[in-house]
Amino acid sequence: MFYIKKDKVKNNGECPIYIKIIFKNQSITISTGKYISEERWTQTDNLRRVLRQDKEKVIKEYLDLYVLKIEKIYNQLTKFQEDVSISEFKLMIIGKHPEDAIPSLVNLIDKHNQYFAQLVEVGERSKASLQKYMRVKELIQTFNVKKYGCKDIQINKVNSAYIYNLESYLKFESEYKGKLGIKNNSTVKYFKNLKTICNYAIKMELIEKNPFNLYSGKIKEVETLFLTQDELERIENKDFKIDRLERVKDLFLFSCYTGYAPVDALQLTRKNIIQDTSKTLWIKANRQKTKTKSNVPLLPQAIKIINKYQFESEYLLPKISNQKMNAYLKEIAEIVGFDKNLTWYIARHTFATTVTLGNGIKIENVSAMLGHKTIRQTQHYAKILDTNVSEDMQKLMEKFKDN
């Protein structure tokens, strides 16, 4: 059915002619690129009467050929039993290939990352998480160039072969800062990011299914590293003569005694400290990564560190960049004589294991202080110490002796 759009009239008084097509019980509208005045459209009964003006005859002939073109495309689809969507059918009518309606993988990543960046701006997600999604885009583009000769591919080409070729590339061929290959757990996390991106695309009705659901890689449990009580005391008792190392040491110890990651600890101010009815000081805040509550009573060691920097700024701890902190931690490990690779993860693990579980704190309470949503998350961080097992078994032995 042809009709004119009166709300799009040109300066010369002519309106564009559109065609409405019903396909699979759905309708689409397409501009024909032709124009006519509302008066002539009405007087000629939508160009169905005998026409006298040459211009109107030309338009009529063009519209008849347009209908014939649509019928030919439809007959061709019927003949070869091709199943296309209404949007793909429209593309074929206007002279484009149906594949033009299929979004590309990098395009979907960009749309997700633009949305995620807005969440970062309003403080709902962290910059660190956004950087991981940007890294995903880099890896995909590099892989596509290596495998397909171009940075992007259509999402319908992301099949099982693509996914496992990508996994192989990430694990054995990708390069970053001079290192070749990415470890299993990091690879699995990148695929998890890709699943999240495609789930967002599904919600936005850009695609219908998530191709990365085909991926079956699993996180491998690795031994959780933490400091023993003796090692913790060795750092605590070490007096570093260099100010930058002393500051990093204090931030590290603060994480060990509160469970706060540096990204969260560095944002704490005095407003985050409250006192309960028993005059115990607490830190009350939300974790940046998960936005969950992470309320922790302040141990004397943590209070001592806070008092040390109380006059420097509104923040509880001194500001240090993440890159420098990691470098300084390695320096501290060498000076103290640790064989362990000192990282901020170790500080959090130490809180979960040595400081809390090792002193009889229930895992449910440890989970709450770490800001975890499930106990399962805490079990990954917290390692049950042999001393705990020994104490529990001693109680069991005493019970059997009585019997």
Image: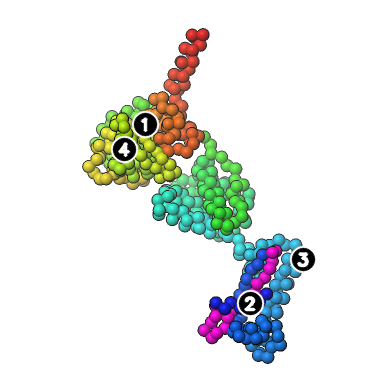
Dot 2 surroundings within 10 Å: few (below 14), some, or many (20 or more)?
A: some
**Residue picked out by circle 2:** 3
**Residue picked out by circle 1:** 338
Considering only vertical position in the picture, is 91 above or below 265? below
Give the amino acid at mark 2.
Tyr
Q: CA distance from mark 3 to mark 2?
A: 30 Å
**Residue picked out by circle 4:** 274
Give the amino acid at mark 3.
Lys
Considering only vertical position in the picture, is 320 above or below 138? above
Q: Residue at horizontal 68%, vertical 77%?
A: 66
Element at label 3: helix
Q: Give the number of the mark in front: 4 or 3.
A: 4
Q: CA distance from mark 4 to mark 3?
A: 75 Å
The quarter holding residue 309 reads top left
Colour pattern: rainbow
Q: Position of residue 94 (x, y in %)?
A: 63, 72
Q: Is residue 55 left or right of residue 353?
A: right
Q: Position of residue 18 (x, y in %)?
A: 62, 76
CB under 8 Å between discs 4 and 3 = no
Q: Residue at horizontal 73%, vertical 72%?
A: 72
Nearer to the camera, 51 or 194: 51
**Residue picked out by circle 3:** 79
Q: Which residues are magenta?
A: 8-25
Q: Position of residue 273 (x, y in %)?
A: 31, 39
In the rendered image, residue 17 lying in the magenta stretch gets the answer yes
Element at label 1: loop
N-terminal of the two: label 2 or label 4?
A: 2
N-terminal of the two: label 3 or label 2?
A: 2
